[in-house]
Structure formats: C-alpha cells, structure tokens
Image (cartoon, rainbow, N blue to C red):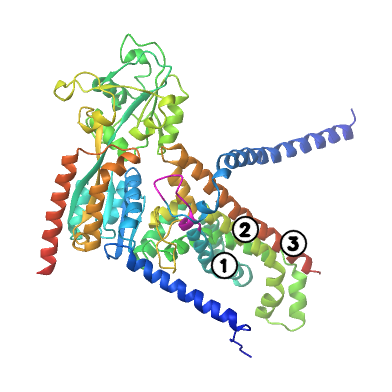
Amino acid sequence: MLNLTFPHKNLSAAVLLGSTLLFSACGGGNGEEANSGLSGTIQIDGSSTVYPITEAVAEEYRTEAPDVRVTVGVSGSGGGFKKFTRGEIDIVDASRTIKPSEEETAKEHNISYIELPVAYDGLTVVVHPENNWVTEMTTEDLKKIWEPAAQGKIKKWNQIRPEWPDQEIHLYGPGVESGTYDYFTEAVVGESGSSRGDYTASEDDNVLVQGVSTDPNALGFFGFAYYEENQDKLKVVPVDDMDDSNGKGAIAPSLETVKDGSYAPLSRPLFIYVNSKAASTPAVVDFVNFYLESAPELSQEVGYIPLPAEMYKEQQEKFSSFAKAKEAATQK
Amino acid sequence: MTNSDINRLKDKAFQVFGIFCTFIGLVVLAIFLIDIVAEGITRINWDFLTSLPSRRASRAGILTAWAGTLWILVLTTLIAFPLGVGAGIYLEEYGRKNRLANFLEINIANLAGVPSIIYGLLGLEIFGRQMRLGGSLLAGALTLSLLILPIIIVTTREAVKAVPRSIRDGSYALGASKWQTIWHQVLPASFGGILTGIILALSRAVGEAAPLIVIGALAYVPFTPSSPLDEFTVLPIQIFNWTSRPQEEFLTNAAAAIIVLLVITFLLNGIAVYLRNKQQKKIRW
C-alpha cells in the first residue's frame, strides 16, 4: 500500500535539488559569517527599566554571535535578584543595587557576582505645562511634599512656598514596588521606600504622563525617557540640591547634566550583575564585553543616558580581571 | 389605569432596561475595538508577524510571541482537557452526594475566583522549581491548566447534568453498564457544552500575562520554541512590555499585537459556537 515513489521523476529531482540547496545554504551561511564561533545560552532577567538596554544589546549581539541564544525576562529587579541569587540565571538587570537580604541568599547558594553600572537614568520631576508658578524646586521642597509626615497635611501649593497659589496639589508617582520609587524616596526623603501614601500610583509610567499632562495641579516624577518623549505635554522642574559643588542652583535633567553628575541627587545608575560561574564561560564573557562596548550608543538610543566614557573603560577592566580570576579558578 | 395596563408598562420598562444593559457592554467593546484597530491596523503586515523583537519599534515583530502563544494553547488543551472533563464526570456521575462532595464542590468554585498571579506563584514553586521545568513552555502550560481547570470542571458538570434522566434510564434498560452509558450516551450528548466551556476557558488562558511572567516566561526571545521544554514568550507579555515603553511607536506595536491576540480569541470563540451548533443538530431525542 505504501507508495513513496514520486509520481513525477522531475518533481523528486526538484525536491532533492531544493533540499540540497537549502542545506548547503544553511551550512554556507554559518561558515561564511565571520562570527565569533561562540555558542551557548545566556539567561537574563530582572528590571523592566533596564530591559530596553539589554534588549538592544541582545539584538545587536545576534549579528555578532548568532549561535549564542540570549533570552531576557522582565520579572522586576526584585524577581530578577531572587532568581539570580539562587543561581537560576546568568545575568540580572537591576535598577537598584543588591539588598543585604539578597546578598545573604546569594551567599547561602554559593553565588558570587560582579556589579557593573551600564547607564544612567535621570528621575524627572514634572508639572502640567500651564503651571506658571513652579520654575524650580529644592530637594527640601520635594521632601516637604513627599515625606510620610506630609500625608493628609500638605495638600496645597502654598503650603510648600507661600508665594505659590492657594490651589490643591495632586501627586503622581510610580508604585511602591518599582525601583524608581525606591531611588526617589531614598534621594529625596532620605529613606528608601518611605513616602506619603496618598498619591496616584501606577506601575506604568505612561499612565503617570497621562495624569500629569491632563491635570493643571499635578506634580509627578518618572524616568527621563518618558519626559523626553512627551516634552510637549509636560513641563520639567529643575531641581536644586542646595550643594553648589556639583553645579550651582536648580538644574534640569538633560543628557549633559545627568552624565556629568550635576543633576543630583536624582540621577541614578542602572546595573547588570553577572554571576561568576557564568563569567567563566566564553559566551558570557564575550557578551558582557559587547554590552559594555555598545552600551554608550544603545542606552542613548532607547532613552537613557550613557556613563562617561572613562567609566565604561573602568567597568571593562574590572570585568576582565574578574573573568580572568574566575577562569583561573575553574582551571585549577 | 387597570392592573393589566400597569403590568404591560412594567413589562415594557424591563425590556428597555434589558436592551440598555446589553448595549452598555457592546458599546464599550465597540469603542475599545475601534480605538485599537484605528491605532494598530496599519502596523500589521507580514514583517510584523515574522520578525523577532527589536529595540526599534518599526523593526520589531511578534513571531516568537504568537508562536509561543500557539504552543501554550495546544499544550494547555492537551493537559487541561482530559483532567477537567475527567474530574467533571467523576463529580457528576460517580461521586456520592456527601460532605466530601460538597467540600470539593465549594473549593472548586472558590478556585475559579483565585487571582491568576497566585497560580503563577504556585506554578513557579511546583513546576518551575520542584519539577525543574524552569521557565519552559511545559511549566507555563501546566500553570495555565491549573488556572482554567475549575472553569472546565464546572462547565463539564453543567453539561453532563443537562442530559435528561430518561436517556440514562433507557441505556440502563437495554443492559448497558454505567461506563457504556457515559461513553455512548452522556458524553456525546453533552459534548457541545463541554467543548464550549473548554474553548472559553482557553480564551481566558490566552490572555494571561501575570502568571507566566512569574514562572519565568521571557520578554525577549530570539528563537521560536521547538520543544515543550524551550523557553518562550507570549503575546500578552509582549503587549504589556510595549505599552510600558516611552516611545509612541511601541504603543502602536502594542495595538497591533492586541489585534492579533483578539483575532486568535475570536477564532477560538467562533470555533466554539460552530461546534456547539453542529453538535446540537446531531442530537435528536
């Protein structure tokens, strides 16, 4: 019953020829491309803030080493560290530094790692474009608005500065789970994760943009990229850290002010952490080097601010000596 | 006004109220659809469906996302279908009506109301860590199966319950055993209802992002899965990721991906309606 012969000899020849071509094409493609010859998998997870940079790097790395399978998840800095400290992933994207409790877990699982800053984000304070009274704010002003004691008390603009109008102030900010919130509260209130609770919170910064751009009494904060993309709908508030050693007076976030450190204290670094065991495999070493090389260009392309060039160099040196030490350790 | 006039008026009022209720749902759905289609339809083209994720919105595609979604759909069906229908038949046909049955019944109903992220945490611990499946398709499908099992069990029971007593009695009268009665009479008669339940449950599973993110489904995957143990991403995760990006063009991508997801869901629902109608025509008591 089984009849596997082709009804037309020509057809079978064509199929044969086609598949030969196909296979040879595949083989040729691999050989021809002057790639690094590396293969393997690299698992990355963590912060959704850092994700766009890592995604961009992974995308570019595809042409560099097509046989290395790089995957990126977005379970948040906390979720990412949870997996990282158990040794389940190779690299974690983090919008904050590792917490003591997480270091503890890493130790329990015998995980050592290296921390590498890859870009800056400037947390940007914004108001509605029709707001004509706020031209700048000091960190004191921001603290007065956001500290836990302000809850239910600071409700009007003139409570912050008497010359500001007797109008309600409506606050918008990221949810308490986000690294952005942690960093802002640490920089402004002085304690990470401590702020008033009566503000409109959203994990989605686009919702905050929408909120501030439609509410004349609004004040909000979020990542620089969200301001940059919506400049026509928002008014940025320059921030004065009352420390003249790093730039005088109130300074608005921009590529330059974040990069040179004068937009303080609201510029924050974004990190990747690399597992030491992973750092002893050639694919991961190559990928991380590629990351640090391409981060200046790619981070800016996706809306972040690159570190100063010498800092990237420093990170590269730090990483290569780390990787070498690991390699030596595994060879012993 | 006579009594019957008043009643007629009430009747009319209720009818208007009913129409109003129906339209609220429809109008909201229509507004949503028009908005999404207007924003996203121009973005849908062959490249969008066959490209890998990218940092450039105009080059980014959903190949790995819809491939992952289809894999998840098939695997979840394979797992949830036998388990759910089996449990439903047991509870309806074999289970004695005692305290234990009551207890099970209440708990199954309660499970249907548990937030999906809880299932994600459960899945992460049991399938991801204990069974060492990690963030694989299989772990995701098992988690989603748990999520929709209660719905399948409940609809199976309702469908089985709707088969008239006389059919069973007739089958027994002809000497059929219980199993023969269930297999040859009850199941075929209730299959339309069961199928509708399963497909509605799957439509829910297709839209879930949260539990899959928890078990470790990814956002950037540069390859389509080739086995159930591969890592994956799904459409809802891609949509969620794109809607939170600052650049306007990513929001357009998200709208386009939503259209694709809606088409998948509508197709599923369409299949459900078709199969149910076909089944109903076949049954003549």
- Secondary element type, mark 2: helix
- Looking at the image, which is closer to me, A148 or A124? A124
Mark 2, chain letter?
Answer: B
Does B166 appear in magenta? no
Residues behind callouts 1 and 3 on a single chain: yes
The disc label shown at residue B81, or none? 1
Identify the subunit bearing mark 1. Answer: B
Q: Does residue B145 appear left or right of residue A238 in this picture?
A: right
User: In this figure, which residue is indicated by the disc labeled 2?
Assistant: B268
Left or right of residue A44: residue B269: right
Label 2 with label 1: CB-CB less than 8 Å: no
State the image quarter where residue A257 is shown: top left
Pointers 2 and 3 in contact (C-beta within 8 Å):
no
- Taking the image as shown, residue B232 lies to the left or right of residue A95, namely right
Separation of disc 1 and disc 3 at Cα?
A: 20 Å
Which numbered disc, 2 or 1, marks the residue that appears first in the sequence? 1
| Closer to viewer: mark 2 or mark 1 | 2
Badge 2 crowding class, 10 Å Cα cut-off, few under 14, some 14 to 19, many 20 or more, is some
Mark nearer the N terminus (1 vs 3): 1
Which stretch appears magenta?
A: B54-66
Residue position marked by numbered label 3 in the rendering: B277
Measuring 11% from the left and 59% from the top, which residue is drawn there? A325
Q: Residue furthest bottom?
A: A1
The amino acid sitting under disc 2 is Leu
| Circles 2 and 3 on the same subunit | yes
The mark that comes first in sequence, 2 or 3, is 2
Circle 3: element type: helix
Between residue A94 and residue B20, name the one nearer to us: A94
Q: Taken as a whole, is the magenta stretch helix, strand or loop?
A: loop
Question: Image quadrant for the N terminus of chain B?
Answer: top right
